[in-house]
């Protein structure tokens, strides 16, 4: 037997392929697949929401059921008085919304938080923070926000987004299991979440449009529609601003422009807020 | 925020990983040339040499090589779709050749003229390699019997 020393040739056990090539193909392919699947699943969830009766939703998320309230509620006399005022305002707005939405019922709550915000929760719940009451100047501005949250309920957006996130998480869980720790899992989860955000932005724009139209029906004009958004714009600094595609809401600038046009087309006199509400809004919040 | 972290990790993994890999392959090829004259075989019976006593000794070469974040990421995407995971190929090739080289270097120290019955074994290190942001490593152990020439034998006939 003879041994002839020869260097083995390269490239037998290693495929000669640029690493970036497969990176781009695979990343683009995966993102594409996720976007398509999330859109299809999302539309399916949207479609099913129609078949959940409103009274069933209200029963399911009633205070004896799956009621979600992540904030502390103020139970002082002033707080209760303000809550009653808000409830009346919402019921009045609801009456002028028309016959299509008769089945809806709303439950208000004031969260003892200084940050201005409002939420629509499944089951007809609307939560307004104390900070929001301080951020608007007139009843019209406040009605705009209430009408915006009501619009979410009329379109059944809280249930829709809940349904979407449930089907998408089930899809991701089915592929990757439950530990949630893999890099890939968080990458795909983020892709799915960003895809869902575009739906969320669409819902917000629709709700803005509906709300300003409801203002015209109720007051005869749309003055005050931009109040809250102007406030947000003034408090937003460059650092807190998030790029549009990563945000659940459309840009404040864009919303103001849209609403301003509507305001200018339907001008009118604003109605001031009752004095007790102004006083209450400026008392200290629990989180400060 | 998470996206920025991911991109930074991918870039770090790509640039450092590629640099380390190129450097390592260069060094492997150079050292393979130096040790080319020492055969490494998988035969189990030693050659028949009657004039000399043959000395046998276990020689081992061991190496652990880690995969970079970039390769791991691409490989895990690849595993969704199936197919050749080329990202792991260079890693294993480097580890195997490095382990064999180390074994040969030890055999050379023993003045061996051949390494017989060579075996290569692989194990993965770091059990948490599935955890987020942690990277796995592969261990390769090469071992064989180094044969060297001992004392001259008296002719018994």
Image (cartoon, coloured by chain):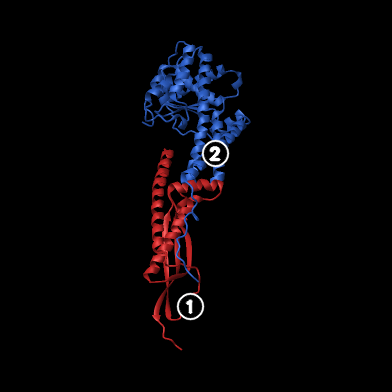
Chain colours: A blue, B red
Residue A227, position as x, y percentages in the image: 43, 19
Q: Considering the numbered disc 2 on the image, is that residue within a helix, a strand or a loop? A: helix
| Vertical relation: B102 (above or below) A163 | below
- In front: A199, or A165? A199
Q: In the rendered image, which residue does mark 1 sit on?
A: B48
Q: Categorize mark 2 by other alpha carbons within 10 Å: few (<14), some (14-19), many (20+).
A: many
Q: Considering the numbered disc 1 on the image, is that residue within a helix, a strand or a loop? A: loop
Q: Categorize mark 1 by other alpha carbons within 10 Å: few (<14), some (14-19), many (20+).
A: few
> Which of the chains bears the disc numbered 1?
B
Q: Quadrant of residue A64?
A: top right
Please report the residue visible at 48 percent of the width from the left and 77 percent of the height from the top: B48
Alpha carbons under labels 1 and 2: distance apart? 65 Å
Q: Which mark is residue B23?
A: none
Residue A244, position as x, y percentages in the image: 45, 29
Please report the residue visible at 53 percent of the width from the left and 30 percent of the height from the top: A199
Residue B31, position as x, y percentages in the image: 39, 60
- In front: B65, or B15? B15
Residue A202 visible in image: yes
Q: Tell me the mark number nearer the camera, choosing from 1 and 2.
A: 1
Toward the right, the furthest residue is: A51
| Total residue callouts | 2
- In front: B26, or B106? B26
| Vertical relation: B56 (above or below) A270 | below
Q: In the rendered image, which residue does mark 2 sit on?
A: A34
Please report the residue visible at 41 percent of the width from the left and 52 percent of the height from the top: B21
Task: Tell me the quarter of the image containing the N terminus of chain B.
Answer: top left
Residue A225 visible in image: no
Residue A118, position as x, y percentages in the image: 46, 27
């Amino acid at each position: 037997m003879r041994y002839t020393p020869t260097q083995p040739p390269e490239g037998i056990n290693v495929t000669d392929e640029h690493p970036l090539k497969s990176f781009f193909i695979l990343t683009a392919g995966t993102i594409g697949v996720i976007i398509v699947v999330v859109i299809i699943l999302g539309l399916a969830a949207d479609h099913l929401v129609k078949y959940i009766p409103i009274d069933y939703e209200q029963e399911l998320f009633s205070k004896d059921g799956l009621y979600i309230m992540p904030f502390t509620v103020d139970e002082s006399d002033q707080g209760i008085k303000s809550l009653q005022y808000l409830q009346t305002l919402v019921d009045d707005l609801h009456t002028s919304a028309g016959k299509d939405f008769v089945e809806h019922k709303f439950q208000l709550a004031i969260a003892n938080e200084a940050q201005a915000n409002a939420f629509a929760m499944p089951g007809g719940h609307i939560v307004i923070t104390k900070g929001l009451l301080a951020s608007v100047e007139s009843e019209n501005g406040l009605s705009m926000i209430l009408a915006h949250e009501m619009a979410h309920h009329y379109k059944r957006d809280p249930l829709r987004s809940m349904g979407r996130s449930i089907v998408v998480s089930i899809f991701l869980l089915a592929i990757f299991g439950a530990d949630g720790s893999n890099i890939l899992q968080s990458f795909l989860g983020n892709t799915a979440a960003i895809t869902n955000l575009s739906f969320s932005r669409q819902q917000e724009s629709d709700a803005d449009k509906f709300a300003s139209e409801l203002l015209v029906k109720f007051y005869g004009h749309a003055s005050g529609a931009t109040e809250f958004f102007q406030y947000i714009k003034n408090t937003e600094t460059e650092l807190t601003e998030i790029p549009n595609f990563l945000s659940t809401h459309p840009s404040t600038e864009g919303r103001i422009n849209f609403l301003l046009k509507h305001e200018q087309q339907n001008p009118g006199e604003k109605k001031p807020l009752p004095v007790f509400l102004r006083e209450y809004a400026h008392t200290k919040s629990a989180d400060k | 925020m998470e996206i920025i972290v991911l991109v930074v990790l991918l870039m770090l993994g790509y640039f450092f990983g590629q640099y380390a890999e190129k450097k390592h392959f260069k060094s492997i090829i150079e050292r393979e040339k130096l040790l080319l004259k020492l055969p490494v075989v998988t035969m189990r019976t030693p050659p028949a040499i009657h004039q000399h006593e043959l000395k046998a000794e276990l020689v081992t070469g061991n190496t652990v090589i880690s995969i970079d974040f970039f390769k791991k990421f691409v490989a895990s995407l690849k595993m969704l779709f199936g197919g050749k995971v080329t990202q792991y190929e260079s890693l294993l090739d480097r580890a195997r050749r490095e382990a064999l080289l180390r074994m040969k270097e030890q055999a050379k120290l023993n003045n061996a003229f051949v390494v017989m019955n060579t075996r290569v074994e692989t194990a993965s290190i770091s059990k948490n390699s599935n955890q987020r942001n942690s990277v796995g490593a592969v261990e390769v152990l090469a071992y064989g019997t180094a044969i060297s020439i001992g004392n001259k034998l008296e002719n018994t006939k």
